[in-house]
Amino acid sequence: MANDDLTGDNLFNDPYPVYARLRKEAPVALFEASHEYFVTRWADCQTVGANDAVFGPSDSELRPEARVFGMPNVLSMSGPEHQSLRAGIDYEVQQARVDTYVEDLARPIANRYIDAILARGEADLTQELFEPISVRLIGDLIGLGHVPNDTLQGWFHAINGGLQNIVAQDPAIWARCDQAIADIDDVMGKMYEAACATPDKSLFSHVIHGGLPDGQRRAFADIMPTMRVIILGGLQEPGHGAANATFGILGDANQTAMMRSDPAGRALKAYDEGLRWIAPIGVTPRVAYRDFELAGTKIAEGSSVAIVLASANRDESRWDNAEAFDMDRKRKSHAAFGYRPHFCSGHYLSRAAGRIALEETFNRLPNLRLDPEKPTSSKGWRFRGVTSLPARWDA
């Protein structure tokens, strides 16, 4: 049975062989460790993601998101309350707004961190370039410009660890996660008081006030579960998306040659393919409102369901040579940003930031290549990325 491979360790180390077998043998499979059905085929993921009448956001206290983020949060909400909150979140990251500031915000940040490593001729591109670019850019947008990069990176790594600790239940991982949440609440509690007194242009301020009648604001306790979602997904995704794409590019001579020949023209295609190839956010949760049969499996009312975005993005029925990174493949929509009504608010900003980071990296680091003496590493399944990407270039 394909379920034999469905273990926490296998998923954490490399979920893709597990997903490939599940798609063939058990496309809807119960993962006992997290008490949820994995839906792994593209068409079935579309069915669950588009059928709001049957599959809605999960607010179960048993889910790891409840333990880590708190409830309710933007991922667990629906209806008018969710729409109102999304209005506050979406304002600063909608396309029309992003186009007014992304170049002036993102390109100087990217070049600042490239400048810091340029003369060395070698670096871990994830830890020393793409993660710092991502956390600084999104951190500044949120309103966390006064918080150092190391702190921001520590926050999202600790929260990520908590989300993926549902099987192992390692006390040390929970301790780091809980401490990060306490630190976030302490820092943002002070920001909350300031933003209530004097609203500003930060995303945090918009979440406090946006989508509400004039003069009203959301309570601190009500918005912090959603802010933790934004901190994890927002700080992490652009950086890991760029790292995943770079790993794919540098792992193939033809892809490397194409990227070097036209960084500006290829950067967005490369970033999008990186998101498909290794989805930074691997699953999105739902709950069944009633009994439903999918791919021959009966899902009972009240069951937790995981739309496995990472698996859908490698479904052989949708993409030729789906396991390979190919920025030149025929363009089709992927599932890395999820499904409405919880489609990622920051998708346009993520793609713009990733494009700029890749463009500047391949423009400014001549003959960029993987370091043959140091291994790369990837980990995770709820959130996955190339966590270490040692590289060299001609300094």
Image: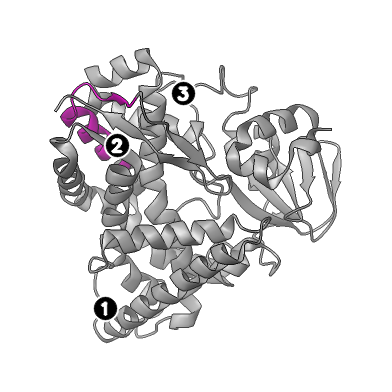
**Residue 256, horizontal then vertical, whole percent:** 32, 19
* Location of residue 384 with respect to 66 vertically, above or below: above
* Location of residue 383 with respect to 61 vertically, above or below: above
Residue 48 placement, left or right of 329: right
Circles 3, 1 touching at the beta carbon (< 8 Å)? no
> Neighbour class for label 3 at 10 Å: few (<14), some, many (≥20)?
many
Report the Cα–Cα distance between label 3 and label 2: 17 Å
- Residue that appears at 31% across and 59% down: 150
Q: Amino acid at mark 2?
A: Arg
**Residue 271, horizontal then vertical, whole percent:** 37, 34
SS for dot 2:
helix
> Which residues lie in the magenta part?
354-371
- Residue matched to label 2: 355
Of the 4 image quadrants, the one containing the C terminus is top left
- Residue that appears at 58% across and 45% down: 381
Magenta stretch, main secondary structure, is helix
- Residue matched to label 3: 325
Report the Cα–Cα distance between label 3 and label 1: 44 Å
Of the 4 image quadrants, the one containing the N terminus is top right
